[in-house]
């Protein structure tokens, strides 16, 4: 077995991009001690420009490729961002994006079947949900306050939130207390992506409970949240979801991550989903994190508004492929392929008009609005691309008992080989011939079967596409 699985196609540019993505991911696995890790252990850090794991990045990297390719490092990363407080295990990190950890933990369990880890994950999940219900939940709207999952910088928000002049959104809570809610951190905004993740956390916690033989306790709360998201964020007039709700006029811009999540999590019904796919603005070089950029960033784009972030591209591409909008998938996949091969690594952020590395404009109290860096070898950019390869093109959908294959092979590829893949102790080799979205034949160990395999032995899989 190799250190990690390989993918070979008859498209050399895609082969090169795959190796770059693997290199960026593998190069960002480093020893670290923190959270529940009692000794230095290999974890997946955020990127070449960072020296630690981040809660949000830990979850996204685990979901996209970490749990599949490096399950031990992914588990250690998730444990490294937990904390013990007053005898309880809780998810640590920035309060607005920490709840995404629940999704990452569930995906780690799907890929490993580790029940001991699942027990810790369930404890952390329900304790953290209880904490935020007590501190950031608004009972009138049935929504959670807090900035957007991806948006730790003020460039993600309307002008009022940039009032302190600092780069981080948390400064608003510290310097504008008169505008905040007197509960929890109190930043008085409700964002689409964050509330989608709370909904996902509720339904995921109940899945964890079922695996542990415990009663489901969140079904009603999840349904109420889903209704609240569709009630308060959906704009019938604009035929799309709002990005942000607050007492200062809100914001009806397109939030790429939020719009991806309403599709991936089944929050949008069929009619709304069709309109989201139709009305989401896509720039020349892919889906922007928020669009348009805020007007204070004249002559450029905000670091968190207008720019293209590859992990959001990956979520959007996944949502598009699962919705049958393969042209939208192709655009994001091709852009990341081209840019990574051009640069020799995956960048943190790209310019929406040129595709060049571009960190975007954002406040800095000492210098005013300035141009920031786009970090090299950003982990979630690489894992986003790997997710497209394994989970969209090869079509691997991970369930608790096995893998369901629903490939979509673009016209640029006709043959794919995947080898040295080990999932739950099962060695899996895959050969895919042809392209398109329909399976003509699916053979496992020489026998014709359906497109689902269980985690109960080694597999040689051949898929012929129509």
Image (cartoon, rainbow, N blue to C red):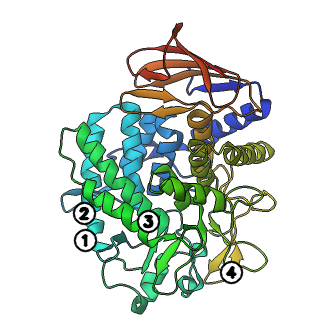
Instruction: Using the image, tell me which numbered label, if any, was put on residue 134.
Output: 1
Question: At which x and y percent is residue 116?
Answer: 26, 37
Quarter of the image that includes the N terminus? top right
Does residue 289 appear left or right of residue 194 in this picture?
right
Residue 201: mark: none
Q: Quadrant of residue 387?
A: top right
In space, the residues marked 2 and 4 are separated at their CA atoms by: 38 Å
Near mark 4 (Cα within 10 A), the count class, few <14, some 14-19 or many ≥20, is many
Q: In the picture shown, does residue 138 fall above or below 247?
A: above
Q: Classify 167 as above or below 197.
A: below
How much space separates mark 4 and mark 3, taking CA atoms?
35 Å
Which is closer to the viewer, label 4 or label 3? 3
Mark 2 touches mark 4? (CB < 8 Å)? no
Identify the secondary structure beneath mark 1: helix
Q: Secondary structure at mark 3?
A: helix
Give the secondary structure at mark 4.
strand
Point out which mark residue 369 bears: 4
x then y, percent, for residue 155: 61, 74
First in sequence, mark 1 or 3: give its number: 1
Sequence order check: which comes first, mark 4 or mark 3?
3
At 55% from the left and 88% from the top, the residue drawn is 163
In the rendered structure, find residue 130 and report the number of the disc placed on it: 2
In percent of width and height, residue 307 lies at: 69, 64
Task: Verify CB contact (< 8 Å) between mark 2 and mark 1.
Answer: yes
* Residue 251 appears in the figure: yes
- Disc 3 and disc 2: Cα gap in Å? 23 Å
């Amino acid at each position: 077995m190799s250190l990690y699985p390989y993918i070979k196609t008859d498209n050399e540019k895609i082969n090169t991009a795959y190796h770059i993505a693997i290199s960026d991911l593998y190069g960002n696995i480093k020893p670290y001690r923190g959270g529940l890790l009692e000794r230095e252990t290999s974890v997946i850090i955020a990127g070449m420009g960072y020296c630690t794991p981040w809660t949000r990045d830990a979850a996204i990297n685990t979901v996209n490729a970490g749990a599949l390719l490096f399950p031990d490092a992914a588990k250690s990363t998730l444990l490294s961002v937990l904390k013990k407080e007053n005898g309880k295990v809780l998810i640590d990190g920035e309060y607005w994006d920490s709840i995404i950890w629940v999704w990452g933990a569930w995906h780690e369990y799907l890929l490993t079947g580790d029940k001991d880890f699942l027990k810790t994950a369930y404890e952390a999940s329900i304790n953290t949900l209880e904490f935020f219900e007590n501190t950031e939940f608004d009972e009138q709207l049935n929504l959670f306050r807090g900035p957007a999952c991806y948006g730790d910088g003020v460039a993600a928000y309307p002008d009022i939130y940039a009032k302190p002049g600092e780069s981080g959104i948390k400064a608003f809570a510290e310097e504008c207390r008169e505008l905040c809610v007197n509960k929890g951190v109190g930043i008085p905004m409700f964002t689409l992506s964050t509330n989608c993740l709370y909904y996902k956390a509720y339904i995921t916690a109940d899945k964890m409970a079922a695996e542990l033989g415990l009663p489901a306790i969140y079904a009603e709360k999840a349904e109420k949240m889903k209704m609240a998201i569709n009630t308060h964020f959906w704009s019938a007039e604009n035929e799309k979801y709002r990005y942000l709700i607050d007492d200062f006029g809100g914001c009806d811009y397109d939030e790429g991550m939020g719009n991806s999540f309403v599709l991936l999590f089944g929050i949008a019904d069929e009619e709304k989903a069709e309109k989201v796919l139709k009305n989401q603005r896509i720039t020349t070089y892919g889906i922007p994190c928020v669009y348009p950029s805020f007007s204070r960033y004249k002559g450029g784009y905000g670091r968190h508004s207008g720019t293209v972030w590859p992990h959001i591209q990956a979520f959007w591409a996944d949502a598009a492929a699962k919705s049958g909008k393969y042209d939208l998938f192709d655009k994001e996949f091709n852009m990341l392929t081209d840019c990574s091969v051009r640069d020799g690594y995956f960048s943190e952020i790209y310019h929406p008009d040129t595709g060049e590395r571009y960190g975007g404009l954002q406040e800095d109290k000492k210098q005013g609005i300035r141009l920031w860096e786009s970090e090299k070898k950003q982990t979630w950019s690489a894992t986003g691309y790997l997710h497209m390869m394994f989970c969209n093109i090869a079509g691997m959908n991970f369930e608790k008992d096995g893998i369901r294959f629903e490939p979509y092979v673009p016209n640029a590829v006709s043959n794919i080989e995947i080898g040295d893949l080990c999932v739950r102790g099962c060695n899996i080799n895959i050969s895919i011939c042809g392209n398109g979205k329909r399976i003509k034949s699916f053979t496992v160990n020489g026998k014709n079967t359906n497109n689902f395999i269980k985690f109960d032995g080694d597999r040689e899989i051949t898929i012929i596409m129509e």
